[in-house]
């Protein structure tokens, strides 16, 4: 363990120290007031940063413009101290005020304690991140902030070491930025924490992790959480022995010792910033005065002796004692500061509540006026008056109260016609639209750089273009991307030296260097996190997950962090990460997966692309690089050696998302599929022709978005029958496609036969070619499924086969 040098004591003025004390007490009073607001019914839940104030004040002193935070939900004092959170914004988030102006972190979309700064302007363009203090948007899953933290720190390494990025001064100043991470001691038990710690040690990046150790994880004490009861003790082997050795610097410090904390963070930040060495700061002996959250009391699980110790070692109490002992302030001065902190918080809380409720009350009053007007002109006056009075008496109303009441009222006057009813319907439609913007917007980019706005450029082929392996088409595409854009880099298992297991990056590490095409360890969570963090800092990473089956390791990070990033910040942050993987048919249980239903349901907020060949995959990569959204591209495992023509404009052509491709025209039935199934279906369609059945084959190409122009319904309008086919389990992606076509597009109106799905078996595919044949749909399955549909329609023309 390292001991910090005591140089900071000569740099901090008494004014600075007292200002810290003021911020600490304001934060404490905000925690106390926040808990009361929940119990008064003005907020649904509260989780607070009390007991962690002094350590966060010290850390904030060394957080510079350009730095990034990736933390957890007790960092309010830190956010106050760096000037990126006001007390009024703090309470606005507690009340879930759905406005960016009130709650810049999440616009009321996340519960309290989830912080973030706005990295984008109102048009969705990057701000000057190198000259502002930055916080990536928090998530609740324990330790889920760690993978992203690796990427935030990794970006500094790239900005320092890649000369091609030196001009991007709005994102970095020579890679001097430190990524500050925070985590509770209990959450260090999560596997993703250890994965991130190891990854940062291997990469040697400026990642400064603070572990806030209050001895518990909700009710579970440290002896049940951590070997030896100390995270710094079990990570001691990461400590480097001298500056020539790779590894960590590890510090231990008491969470109530203001000067020691300042000295520690000064030393830790200096090592990180100057040497690009990761640092762990284990902050011990912290307290949690109000317990874990408003959902329970810590008196239930802490002993009397522990509670007494926490009272004695409360960090603000200890800081007050030190101020008095050192003569930096008098008791009267500190009493005044503490009283002023209570009043400041009271005023901020009141202002936030008034701003939150004023607009709601205005909407409610208008709804009541219109409801009264409707009642006075309706035969249902008694029923309408009753439900209107219930709304009028609602204590602390929220937006849904008025909307719910209006919708109920309209049921009773469904047969009436009046001006009052028309006005009320108009109010409802306007309010529903406003609330859609408040609560349902920004799942995807709404900027001019949206992937859906990328102009299509068709592939061009020379007259004598040779047939080459599909993997060579991708190789040429990636070569062009790396050549024209220094922001692009690729990471993943086996991506570097051997050019990935299917050779699409073959030779590109040698050509562009290890910073651009990089091998990683076997660590899917932090491969994704490395990409997310780097994308948050303006870079354009391609993060490879070697097989689609392995996406399960990282699905939580993709779902909880990346996919919902734009949504949970209401367009305040973006991470246009391209995730590359391969799946579908190969061999065996763990290398031929098609869990597409899982993917498309877990990753709303990302685009999911399923190209049938590498020419289309390359076009999608080009499209994504021109946009500002994250996406998953699933290449066909059995397509790398199949022959394709190389487009002459390999680096320029783009394919639109959400537009199916008609592979074969037909008149009797529409078959909807994607990926490797396209070849299976096309062969079946050829065989069906021998028996007089004309099948139209459509490759959806992208599942998210799905058929934006309703081209599949256009096909069904002609054929009047449809079969959805893929390699997922029953009820997986075929069910999704059916819902989109039959329900959303309304194609049921054109059907003369029941829509049907053809999927794989409900188990994973068995090994060997026979395992593939009997586990996943084959040509004969497709043929017979189509034939049976036609047999039902015309049994004389299409008699049963067997």
Image (cartoon, grey):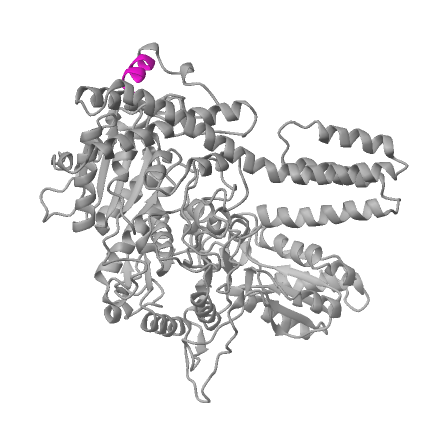
Query: Looking at the rendering, which quadrant does residue 53 occupy?
Result: top left
Q: Position of residue 567 (x, y in %)?
A: 51, 49
Magenta residues, start to end: 306-314
- The magenta stretch spans residue 313: yes
Tell which of 61 and 227 is nearer to you.
61
The residue depicted at 48 percent of the width and 31 percent of the height is 349
Tell which of 512 and 386 is nearer to you.
386
Tell which of 350 and 300 is nearer to you.
350
Tell which of 129 and 483 is nearer to you.
129
The residue depicted at 88 percent of the width and 44 percent of the height is 415
Image height of 188 relative to 633, above or below: above
Q: Is residue 684 left or right of residue 484?
A: right
Q: How many marks?
A: 0
Furthest residue to the top?
304
Furthest residue to the bottom?
463
Do we see residue 199 in this rendering?
yes
Q: Quadrant of the C terminus?
A: bottom right
Q: Position of residue 671 (x, y in %)?
A: 65, 65
Query: Looking at the rendering, which quadrant does residue 363 occupy?
Result: top right
Q: Position of residue 277 (x, y in %)?
A: 19, 47
Q: Position of residue 330 (x, y in %)?
A: 24, 20
Do we see residue 731 in this rendering?
no
Q: Quadrant of the N terminus?
A: top left
Q: Is residue 285 left or right of residue 560?
A: left
Q: Main secondary structure of the magenta part?
A: helix
Image height of 724 relative to 300, above or below: below
- The magenta stretch spans residue 340: no
């Amino acid at each position: 363990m390292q001991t910090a040098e005591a140089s900071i004591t000569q740099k901090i003025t008494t004014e600075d120290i007292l200002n810290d004390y003021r911020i600490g007490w304001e934060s404490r009073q905000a925690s106390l007031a926040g808990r009361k607001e929940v119990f008064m019914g003005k907020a649904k839940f509260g989780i607070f940063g009390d007991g962690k104030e002094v350590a966060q004040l010290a850390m904030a002193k060394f957080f510079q413009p350009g730095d990034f935070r990736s933390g957890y939900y007790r960092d309010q004092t830190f956010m106050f101290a760096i000037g990126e959170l006001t007390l009024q914004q703090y309470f606005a988030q507690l009340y879930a005020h759905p406005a960016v102006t009130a709650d810049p972190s999440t616009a009321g979309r996340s519960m309290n304690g989830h912080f973030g700064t706005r990295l984008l302007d109102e048009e969705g363009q990057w701000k000057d991140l190198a000259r502002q203090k930055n916080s990536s948007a928090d998530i609740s899953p324990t330790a889920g902030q760690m993978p992203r933290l690796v990427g935030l720190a990794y970006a500094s390494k790239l900005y320092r070491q890649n000369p091609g990025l030196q001009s991007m001064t709005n994102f970095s100043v020579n890679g001097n930025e430190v990524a500050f991470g925070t985590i509770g001691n209990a959450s260090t038990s999560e596997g993703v924490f250890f994965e991130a710690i190891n990854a940062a040690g291997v990469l040697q990046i400026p990642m400064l992790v603070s572990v806030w150790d209050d001895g518990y994880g909700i009710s579970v004490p440290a002896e049940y959480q951590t070997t030896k009861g100390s995270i710094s003790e079990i990570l001691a082997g990461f400590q480097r022995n001298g500056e020539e050795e790779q590894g960590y610097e590890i510090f231990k410090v008491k969470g109530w010792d203001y000067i020691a904390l300042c000295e520690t963070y000064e030393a830790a930040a200096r090592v990180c910033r100057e040497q690009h060495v990761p640092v762990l700061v284990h902050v011990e002996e912290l307290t949690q005065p109000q317990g874990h959250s408003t959902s329970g009391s810590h008196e239930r699980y802490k002993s009397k002796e522990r509670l007494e110790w926490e009272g004695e070692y409360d960090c603000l109490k200890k800081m007050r004692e030190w101020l008095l002992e050192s003569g930096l302030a008098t008791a009267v001065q500190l009493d005044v500061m503490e009283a002023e902190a209570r009043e400041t918080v009271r005023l901020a809380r009141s202002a936030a509540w008034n701003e939150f409720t004023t607009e709601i009350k205005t909407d409610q009053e208008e709804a009541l006026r219109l409801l009264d007007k409707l009642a006075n002109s309706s035969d249902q006056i008694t029923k309408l008056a009753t439900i209107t009075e219930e709304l009028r008496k609602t204590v602390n109303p929220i937006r849904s109260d008025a909307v719910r009441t209006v919708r109920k009222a309209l049921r009773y006057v469904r047969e009436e016609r009046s001006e009052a009813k028309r006005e009320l319907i108009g109010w409802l439609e306007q309010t529903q639209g406003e609330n859609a913007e408040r609560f349902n917007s920004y799942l995807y980019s709404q900027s001019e750089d949206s992937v859906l706005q990328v102009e299509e450029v068709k592939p061009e082929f020379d007259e004598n273009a040779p047939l080459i392996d599909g993997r060579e088409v991708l190789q040429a595409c990636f070569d062009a991307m790396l050549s024209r854009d220094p922001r692009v880099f690729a990471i993943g298992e086996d991506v570097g030296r051997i050019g990935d297991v299917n050779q699409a990056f073959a030779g590109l590490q040698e050509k562009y260097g290890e910073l651009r095409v990089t091998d990683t360890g076997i660590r899917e969570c932090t491969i994704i996190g490395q990409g997310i963090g780097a994308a948050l800092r303006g870079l354009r990473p391609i993060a490879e997950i070697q097989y689609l089956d392995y996406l399960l390791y990282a699905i939580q990070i993709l779902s909880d962090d990346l996919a919902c990033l734009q949504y949970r910040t209401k367009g305040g942050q973006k991470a246009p990460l391209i995730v590359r993987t391969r799946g579908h048919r190969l061999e065996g249980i763990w290398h031929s997966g098609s869990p597409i239903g899982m993917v498309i349901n877990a990753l709303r907020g990302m685009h999911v692309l399923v190209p049938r060949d590498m020419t289309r995959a390359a076009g999608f990569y080009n499209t994504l690089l021109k946009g500002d959204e994250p996406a998953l591209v699933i290449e066909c495992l059995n397509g790398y050696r199949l022959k394709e023509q190389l487009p002459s404009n390999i680096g320029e052509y783009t394919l639109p998302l959400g537009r199916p491709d008609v592979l074969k025209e037909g008149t009797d039935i529409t078959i909807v599929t994607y990926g490797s199934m396209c070849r299976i279906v096309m062969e079946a369609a050829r065989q069906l022709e021998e028996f007089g059945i004309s099948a139209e084959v459509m490759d959806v190409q992208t599942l998210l978005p799905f058929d934006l122009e309703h081209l599949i319904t256009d096909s069904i309008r002609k054929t009047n029958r449809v079969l959805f086919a893929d390699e997922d389990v029953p009820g997986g992606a075929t069910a999704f496609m059916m819902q989109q076509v039959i329900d959303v597009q309304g194609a049921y109106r054109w059907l003369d036969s029941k829509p049907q799905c053809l999927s794989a078996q409900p188990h994973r595919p068995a090994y060997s070619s026979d395992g593939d044949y009997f586990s996943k749909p084959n040509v004969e399955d497709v043929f017979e499924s189509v034939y049976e549909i036609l047999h039902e329609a015309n049994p004389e023309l299409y008699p049963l086969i067997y």
